[in-house]
Image (cartoon, coloured by chain):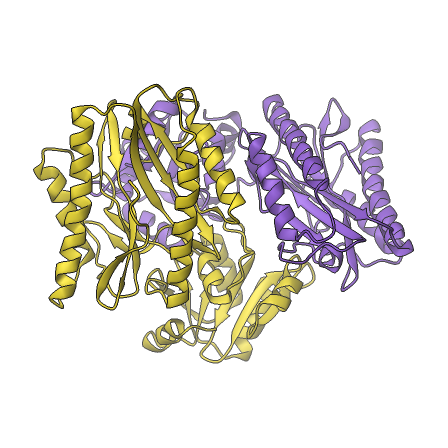
Chain colours: A purple, B yellow
Amino acid sequence: MPKASILDLLKTKQLDAILLSSPSQIIYLTSYLGFSPVERDAFLLITDKKSYLFTNSLIVDELKNRVKGIIVIEHNRSKSFAKNIAEVIKKEKIEKLGFESNNLTVAEYLALTENISSRFVSIDISRLRSIKDDLEIANIKKACIISQKAFIQTQKLIKPGVTEQEIANIFQINVLKLGAALSFPTIVAFEQNSAIPHHLPDNTKMKKNGIILMDFGIRYNNFCSDITRTFFIGEQTKEQKEVYKVVLNSQQEAVRFIEKNLKDNQQILAAEVDKIAREYIISKGYPSIPHSLGHGIGIEVHEAPTLAPNSQDEIKGGMIFSIEPGIYLPNKFGVRIEDLYTIQDKKLVILSDSLI
Amino acid sequence: MPKASILDLLKTKQLDAILLSSPSQIIYLTSYLGFSPVERDAFLLITDKKSYLFTNSLIVDELKNRVKGIIVIEHNRSKSFAKNIAEVIKKEKIEKLGFESNNLTVAEYLALTENISSRFVSIDISRLRSIKDDLEIANIKKACIISQKAFIQTQKLIKPGVTEQEIANIFQINVLKLGAALSFPTIVAFEQNSAIPHHLPDNTKMKKNGIILMDFGIRYNNFCSDITRTFFIGEQTKEQKEVYKVVLNSQQEAVRFIEKNLKDNQQILAAEVDKIAREYIISKGYPSIPHSLGHGIGIEVHEAPTLAPNSQDEIKGGMIFSIEPGIYLPNKFGVRIEDLYTIQDKKLVILSDSLI
């Protein structure tokens, strides 16, 4: 701490310091898991030599105990965050200050600029975490294993009469019993609800036959998994079989495209991968995927890179990302298949071994 | 929808429309529970006659099905949110536009002001939800009941050798089995960990005797509970008994102060309530409470009013708030007692009947 990627950014942008406000970046750089994802528990200021963590009195002792190599500064009623940071900015002679414009609120920005004379420079650090190290990859792999275990346990309990909400609940209990937590609310969609990409589980009951879409993820050691499975109870219709096959092939087209480019030592553009899978589905006469083909994953469920038509990202070794094509036929049914992959030693490796 | 309080705000601030971005406000006004608390799933634009919900293609159909009385507009790759809202702003002739400066990010603000010629006016709507209606109160009461049930089930399992993390996990499983979800990560702190107000449960093991602090809350029909209990296994020391008594008395001092003022038809300032409890603790020779005495609760665990020394809030009928004094003795132990209260028919009513 600070990680090399932050130091690079300081140098290339010629910044004296970077002020981080987003919980995911602060969790990444401190390895402390207790920050709220919705409340502002801390700000992290990083220069090329020192790091300062500004936090409130509720967790200050916890942070002093657990976070090493960072100066922890407490704000409270007698000394505000604005005052504390102004002092450090002055002491460290910070003239050019990078900040997360896609996280800092307008009110926070106004309060800071009122107290600090540094020049504020908007920086985009959404790609900071896109290349994972071995430990990060191991944690996400483990998250995939746990979520698949919980999924198999849950899947057995799907029978006529059970509701989507009950299945979502059972999945979560299974995850907790395995010592992990959810990384996002589980999607369980029966029948025509599966045609809505992000359907909220409700009291819809399972019938005798039917299609089930489950999109689930867990958090292990603070790293996320994200997997989607579509499966059937009873007889499948001919159309369902056909659609499932097209979605699976679409995913495999993307996989083969990446593998071929790795073998040929070619640059792999995320937009190109998206295009291969998307056009395969369209070529079979189905509607285009109404979402991105895939996304990076790590401390957040969605992070860089983005596999989408307008993406500027390049797929590189050490990235972990989903490939998740889908076909959604409104008022009928939908199929999505989502797996996580990484690139290690110039090879594409699946982290969520396809179970279905 | 829109609720009367938003219409009042439009009028008093002479706004043509208000743009809401915070998930909690959008959940409040749409009653749709599926919005992510961390990602930007939607924006809500409210004029005195119409409401527009701008959202992405993943949940647009879900929202069209579930949210009534609101015009749902989809943004996607071919038409951006910026473009969609610019059209509506033009059509509705919106000149003066209120926005949540404590939620909208700098990047979002810049993108919007680039596309929209309206004058942006910062509004603070943090108090919008502070007075609860009967249904909201009933939901929070139910949330209190469920969380206390889960707490009692969990408490029975605390015995020598069990870890804080295991107890936190068991509590969550019990909550899920009761058909609810957590509203925040449960705090379980054994012994000297209880001296840290927001301790993160870890592998600390329960000993034969000891103090246990549990701060727990659940979400039911989207409304939160938040309760803290401090209790003992085995013998208490004389100091522990004394500290517990002082904290409980401090809470009761605040309760009596509110009750007296209600009876006398006096205005009740939140800062005054805080002062009563805080000074009682100090008068007994213990350190001041390192946090606010209390906070409002609703869709969010922390919302208006704030019971703190610098609070400008007034305690009024229909508000729901915590009273949670605490004494923390570093490297020894801490005690916090937190209950939720509301004011109905000029009477203070406890929602989380004290079990311990």
Choose top left, top right, bottom left or bottom right for residue B282. top left
Seen at 54% across and 76% down, the residue is: B90
Q: Can residue A17 be seen in this view?
A: no
Please say whether residue A192 is visible from this viewpoint.
yes
Number of labels in the image equals: 0
Rendering quarter of residue B103 = bottom left
Q: Is residue A4 above or below residue A218?
A: above
Q: In which quarter of the image is the C terminus of chain A?
A: top right
When the figure is inspected, residue A237 is found, relative to residue A313, above or below; the finding is: below
Q: What x and y, as percent, mark residue A157? A: 70, 42
- Furthest residue to the right? A238
Residue at 18%, 32% in the rendered image = B243
Q: Position of residue A263 (x, y in %)?
A: 83, 27
Residue drawn at 65 percent across, 40 percent down: A226
Which residue occupies the foreground of this view, B296 or A342? B296
Quarter assignment of residue B127: bottom left
Where residue B336 appears, x then y in whole percent?
A: 26, 38
Q: Which residue is drawn at 17% across and 36% down?
A: B245
Horizontally, residue A94 falls left or right of residue A209, namely left
Residue A148 placement (x, y as % from top left): 69, 34
Q: Nearer the viewer, residue B136 or B89?
A: B136
